[in-house]
Image: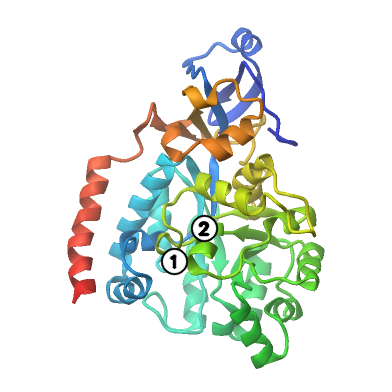
């Protein structure tokens, strides 16, 4: 619940035209509303839908392949058809895991937007900008031209929002960054970039430019509200002060950080400094399952002891990062991320009726350290059922599995040769 993590017992949510109309004791809402449909889930927890603050759905078709081989295969197969089919499979997986909104940074963003819209899922779609030629555009100018065309298509879309997704600082020049800043100002668009992912990245920036990546971006005027820093693992005190002062939001991907063996985003320190922190899964090749609840548990475990500069990260705070924190980082905090009247009815239901969950004193502790995505029973996006009693409604599961098998039959022989 907003504004604090509040658990309400014997309560209900009334949904009208896809929005939360009221929250309160079940008896009061039953008397107040003549319901067209009434859904009862005893021994369940109702939460805001999980928000995946950063992912790359295209990699869903390369999961289970060693990272180097997956990168090589992706270069050979990447195209609009692969991007579209991978996005459909990934969206289906995320819905089953209770994720009702995601931010994606891949080539061919128009295909990902179509896949999200077909499932009636809320999505923030990254418009790639690069100085290097790729399959989507050849120059930074061409990237921005295509991005502005898509902006006109989706500027009023109720489910799809757009932002500028930049590559790591070492691969993009100051001229392009300044151009992105000007265009983002004109469109009032968000900008994101992976930053300070490891000590190697920071040291390389110091060697090439004599300053840390955050210092470079601050000098270019990019650090401000609406800028999202992805990973942000290698930080000193001056970096944290800069992020807090400029209003930057952070999206941490703890499982991806662990798998890559680099530094870990200090989410407890950032949270204690008043910085907005959300959670993301990153690429399925790097992080594994598109499972925000698993990211919550990992963040809570990593931050359980604190680090001397910040208190330990509580389960409730970690859970908030996966809902209102990530929603705020995506610029959607007024629309989703908490259960309160006026917000979109993006909701997820978890079954806590098994033996280990009997009468938990701290529901957040029980959910974060005891539940898995297998306990997601129901998911709603704008009040529309996407998963009901464990059954995926937004997609035909058999069709999605067949689609994945067809791509596997094409990709794996190439990887094995």
Indicate which disc residue 356 carries.
none
Residue 400 as seen in the image, left or right of residue 138: left
Residue 202 position by quadrant: bottom right
The image quadrant where one finds the N terminus is: top right
Q: How many marks?
A: 2
**Circle 1 residues within 10 Å: few <14, some 14–19, many ≥20:** many
Q: CA distance from mark 2 to mark 1?
A: 20 Å
| Residue name at image x 60 percent, y 59 percent | 252
In this view, 399 is above or below 391: below
Is 339 placed above or below 315 here? above
- Residue 180, given in percent of the width and then of the height, sits at 61, 75
Question: Which residue sits at x=56%, y=76%?
Answer: 168
Single out the mark in the foreground, 2 or 1. 2
Q: How is the image coloured?
A: rainbow
Q: Is residue 376 above or below residue 127?
A: above
Task: Estimate the x, y position of residue 407 in percent, counting from the top left.
Answer: 22, 60
Q: Are marks 2 and 1 in contact (CB under 8 Å)?
A: no
| 65 relative position to 132: left or right | left
Of 235 and 2, which appears nearest the observer?
Answer: 235
Secondary structure of the residue carrying numbered label 1: loop
Write the residue at 71% across / 81% down: 212
Query: What residue sits 41% from the left and 61% below the top?
Result: 110
Residue 255's disc number: 2
What is the crowding at mark 2: few (fewer than 14 residues within 10 Å), some, or many (at least 20)? many
The quadrant holding residue 340 is top right
Residue that label 1 marks = 106
Element under label 2? helix
């Amino acid at each position: 619940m907003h504004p604090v993590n509040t658990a309400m017992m014997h309560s209900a949510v009334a949904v009208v035209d896809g929005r939360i109309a009221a929250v309160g004791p079940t008896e009061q809402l039953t008397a107040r509303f003549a319901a067209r449909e009434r859904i009862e889930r005893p021994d369940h927890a109702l939460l805001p839908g999980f928000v995946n603050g950063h992912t790359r759905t295209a990699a869903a078709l390369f999961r289970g392949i060693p990272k180097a081989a997956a990168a090589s295969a992706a270069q050979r197969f990447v195209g609009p058809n692969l991007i579209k089919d991978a996005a459909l499979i990934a969206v289906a997986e995320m819905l089953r895991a209770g994720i009702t909104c995601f931010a994606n940074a891949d080539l061919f963003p128009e295909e990902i937007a179509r896949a999200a819209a077909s499932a009636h899922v809320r999505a923030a779609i990254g418009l790639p900008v690069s100085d290097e030629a790729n399959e989507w555009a050849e120059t930074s100018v061409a990237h921005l031209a295509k991005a502005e065309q898509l902006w006109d298509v989706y500027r009023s879309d109720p489910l799809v929002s757009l932002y500028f997704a930049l590559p790591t600082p070492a691969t993009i020049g100051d001229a392009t960054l300044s151009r992105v800043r000007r265009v983002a100002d004109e469109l009032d668009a968000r900008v994101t970039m992976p930053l300070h992912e490891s000590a190697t990245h920071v040291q390389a920036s110091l060697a090439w430019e004599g300053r840390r990546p955050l210092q470079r971006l601050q000098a270019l005027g990019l650090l401000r509200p609406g800028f999202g820093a992805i990973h942000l693992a290698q930080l000193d005190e001056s970096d944290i002060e800069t992020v807090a002062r400029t209003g930057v939001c952070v999206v941490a991907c703890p499982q991806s950080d662990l798998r890559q063996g680099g530094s870990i985003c200090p989410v407890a320190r950032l949270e204690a400094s008043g910085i907005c922190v959300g959670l993301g899964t990153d690429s399925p090749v790097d992080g594994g399952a598109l499972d925000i609840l698993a990211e919550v548990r990992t963040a809570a475990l990593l931050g359980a002891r604190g680090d001397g500069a910040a208190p330990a990260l509580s389960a409730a705070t970690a859970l908030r990062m996966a809902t209102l924190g990530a929603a705020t980082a995506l610029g959607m905090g007024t629309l989703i991320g908490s259960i309160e009247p006026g917000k979109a009815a993006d909701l997820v239901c978890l079954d806590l009726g098994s033996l280990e969950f009997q009468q938990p004193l701290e529901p957040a502790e029980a959910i974060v350290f005891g539940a898995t995505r297998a306990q997601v029973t129901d998911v709603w996006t704008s009040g529309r059922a996407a998963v009901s009693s464990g059954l995926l409604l937004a997609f035909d599961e058999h069709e999605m599995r067949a689609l994945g098998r067809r791509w596997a039959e094409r990709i794996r022989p190439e990887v094995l040769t």
